[in-house]
Image (tube, rainbow, N blue to C red):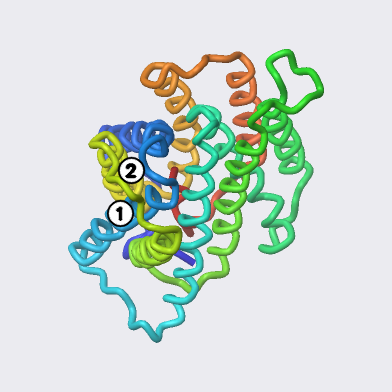
Amino acid sequence: MMKPGPDSTPVNSVLPVPAFLAAALALIVIWGTAYTMVSVGVDYIPPIWLVSLRCVLGAFLVTVFCYARGYRLPKLTDKRWAVYFGLGITGMVAPFWLLSIGQISVDSGIAAIIVGAMPILTIVLAHFFAHEPLTWRKFTGFVIGFFGIVILFLPEDFSLALISDWKAQALILGAAFFYAVTTVAAKRAPDTSAVVGATIMLISAAITSTAMALYSGIPETMPPAIGWWMAVGLGVGSTAIGTILYLWVVEKSGPSAMAKINYFPPLISVLAGVWLLSEEFTYRAIIALVVILVGVALSRPRRRKRTVPPTPLA
């Protein structure tokens, strides 16, 4: 299981409030606008190539950060490579790819709202595979959150008919499912520093996604500059800087701090989509977001352990 780092410090005992707020704001903006960049990027770059570019760049930067902090990656014979390599596939490659395909036709704000439901999927999987009983409080949160997802699959008039792009939304829900699987699986992973675990996961994601991209075929034409900028923004932003900031905040302030931060990226994504991409602002999306967040808040345990699951990246 990934540990916060060399020192397990009580919440806010080391990280000053202004620094925490600055880091939290940066993470909210980085993760919230990542969906916006994916929506633009897939217009110019095939989804799997977009995933490959962001993972390669992110892996390079996080590996540099890992060694700069004094950490060292284990030998290739160490079992942590096999475990965290697999987590890189389920926690990065699979969800990034499904998100990129789904966002060809689904608005970035809707995608962020669906992925925001990941915690309610996690509590169900944890009940069966991580020996964390599904209490009535958690179950109520799951039902409420799941109802929020259902709202997104219904038309604006809430009639009992599926929207036209329900299949694309289902792919995005699949991305949320893979994030949940990774979170539960990480609890059985060998103990290691969160920095080392995240680095191995990104290296895994870079290798796997690049192999998939090459297998799919090299694009016949080069993407325009805006496509490259979106890939660079995703690689440097949510995939590298987002991971580094996440690890820093968790190391200094604890996982419970991240639980509070994770409520806001979907809202930023909705606002960014409306403002930057002229996406439609619908009451259905806002209602779904509120319902899902209520379900997530209700399903969260009252006390959280200091152990840290892999970063759920956008």
Residue 14 visible? The answer is no
Mark 2: secondary structure? helix
Residue 262 visible? The answer is yes
Label 1 close to label 2 by CB (< 8 Å): yes
Vertical arrangement, residue 253 with respect to residue 44, above or below: below
Residue 234's mark?
Answer: 2
> 87 or 218: which is nearer to us?
218
Q: Which residue in the structure is indicated by mark 1?
A: 58
Query: In the displayed structure, does residue 121 sit left or right of residue 25?
Result: right
* Neighbours of disc 2 within 10 Å: few (<14), some (14-19), many (20+): many
From the top left corner, tell me how far across and down residue 195 is, in percent.
34, 62
**Number of labelled discs?**
2
Mark 1: secondary structure? helix
Q: Quadrant of residue 217?
A: bottom left
Vertical arrangement, residue 231 with respect to residue 6, above or below: above
Q: Amino acid at mark 2?
A: Leu
Query: In the displayed structure, does residue 258 sit left or right of residue 187?
Result: left
Q: Residue at x 41, y 46 (%)?
A: 46
Q: Residue at x 30, y 48 (%)?
A: 235
From the top left corner, tell me how far across and down residue 197 is, in percent.
39, 66
Q: CA distance from mark 1 to mark 2?
A: 8 Å
Vertical arrangement, residue 178 with respect to residue 79, above or below: above
Q: Amino acid at mark 1?
A: Gly
Q: Residue at x 35, y 43 (%)?
A: 238
Q: Quadrant of residue 162?
A: top right
Q: Could you tell which of marks 1 and 2 lies nearer the N-terminus? A: 1
Assign the C terminus to one quadrant of the image.
top left
From the top left corner, tell me how far across and down residue 160 is, in percent.
81, 23
> 286 or 43: which is nearer to us?
43
Residue at the far front in the pictured view:
220
Query: In the displayed structure, does residue 52 sit left or right of residue 63?
Result: right
